[in-house]
């Protein structure tokens, strides 16, 4: 990981050892290489191979309205407060292939907020960001997404938001017409905007304590006074260096609010 950082400036050095090992071994199997040393030698010589390795190291897997209770809590407990702002900025950190971005856009449109909301969607994987921009998802996943949407308090018909063709569903481009998709690393980059909501879900679980605190520091710095932070269902700020800088807004759904 040190060699990758020095060569390509992608910093995986503070990802958890267990997740790194699992991903690298999977990459060896899929790429047909005999050892980690063989992988390192080729990756350092072949930038194209690093691009393929990146897909294993980042694991771009997500789903729309994942953990529906989180989105329901946003709808019920966060959106009413966001309505008090003249404009809203939302940062989806680690947006992967865009499922959460489109989920939030749908929610905000239904709540009458999308037109005055700027969404920043960031990730370190260029291929994932390109897929997110396209807004095209497998048709076979739509049934599950529909159930999630309904459980998340959806106010309409989920099918109104996409057009199905062959084996894919293309979501209404207007949902994310004003979304800024950008390359951003929580390990190496800085804050780029003041926001009222940061949603970073199922990302911190792959970081060690040092990198978790760095990411939480970025979120704290980005959030405006009393801004909201949403984490994944298996994540928490309770034992971090920022535990005293947030209060809990919806504990079960891992939604926190900046204290100062």
Image (cartoon, grey):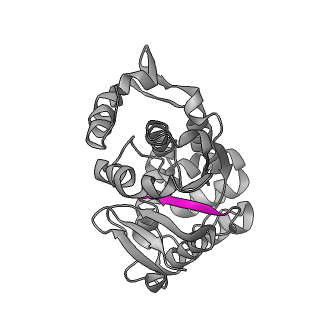
Residue 197 placement (x, y as % from top left): 52, 59
Q: Is residue 12 left or right of residue 24?
A: right
Q: Nearer the viewer, residue 115 or 130?
A: 115
Q: Quadrant of the N terminus?
A: bottom right
Query: Which image quarter: residue 173?
Result: top right
Residue 5 placement (x, y as % from top left): 68, 67
**What residue appears at the point 55 percent right and 41 percent down from the top-left corner?**
114
Question: Is residue 234 visible to us here?
Answer: yes
Residue 16 placement (x, y as % from top left): 45, 72
Q: Nearer the viewer, residue 232 or 8?
A: 232
Q: Is residue 197 magenta?
A: yes
Characterize the magenta stretch by its predominant secondary structure: strand
Residue 92 placement (x, y as % from top left): 54, 53
Question: Is residue 236 visible to us here?
Answer: no
Q: Is residue 65 magenta?
A: no
Q: Which residues are magenta?
A: 194-201
Location of residue 201 with respect to 16 vertically, above or below: above
Q: Quadrant of the C terminus?
A: bottom right
**What residue appears at the point 45 percent right and 86 percent down from the top-left corner?**
244
Location of residue 214 with respect to 138 vertically, above or below: below
**What residue appears at the point 39 percent right and 69 percent down from the top-left corner?**
18
């Amino acid at each position: 990981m040190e060699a990758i950082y020095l060569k390509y400036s992608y910093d995986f050095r503070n990802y958890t050892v267990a997740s790194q090992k699992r991903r690298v071994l999977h990459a060896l199997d899929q790429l047909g290489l005999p050892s980690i040393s063989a992988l390192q030698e080729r990756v350092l010589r072949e930038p194209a191979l690093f691009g393929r390795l990146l897909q294993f190291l980042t694991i771009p897997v997500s789903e729309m309205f994942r953990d529906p209770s989180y989105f329901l809590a946003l709808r019920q407990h966060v959106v009413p407060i966001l309505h008090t702002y003249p404009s809203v900025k939302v940062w989806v950190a680690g947006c992967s292939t865009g499922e959460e971005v489109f989920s939030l856009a749908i929610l905000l449109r239904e709540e009458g907020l999308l037109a005055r909301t700027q969404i920043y969607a960031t990730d370190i994987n260029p291929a994932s960001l390109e897929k997110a921009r396209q807004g095209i998802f497998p048709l076979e996943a739509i049934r599950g997404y529909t159930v999630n949407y309904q459980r998340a308090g959806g106010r309409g018909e989920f099918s109104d938001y996409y057009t199905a063709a062959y084996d894919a569903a293309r979501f209404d481009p207007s949902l994310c017409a004003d979304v800024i998709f950008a390359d951003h690393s929580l390990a190496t980059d800085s804050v780029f905007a003041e926001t009222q909501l940061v949603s970073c879900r199922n990302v911190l679980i792959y970081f060690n304590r040092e990198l978790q605190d760095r990411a939480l520091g970025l979120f704290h710095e980005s959030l405006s006074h009393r801004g909201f932070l949403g984490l994944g269902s298996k994540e928490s700020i309770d034992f971090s260096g920022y535990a005293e800088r947030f209060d809990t807004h919806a504990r079960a759904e891992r939604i926190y609010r900046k204290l100062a």
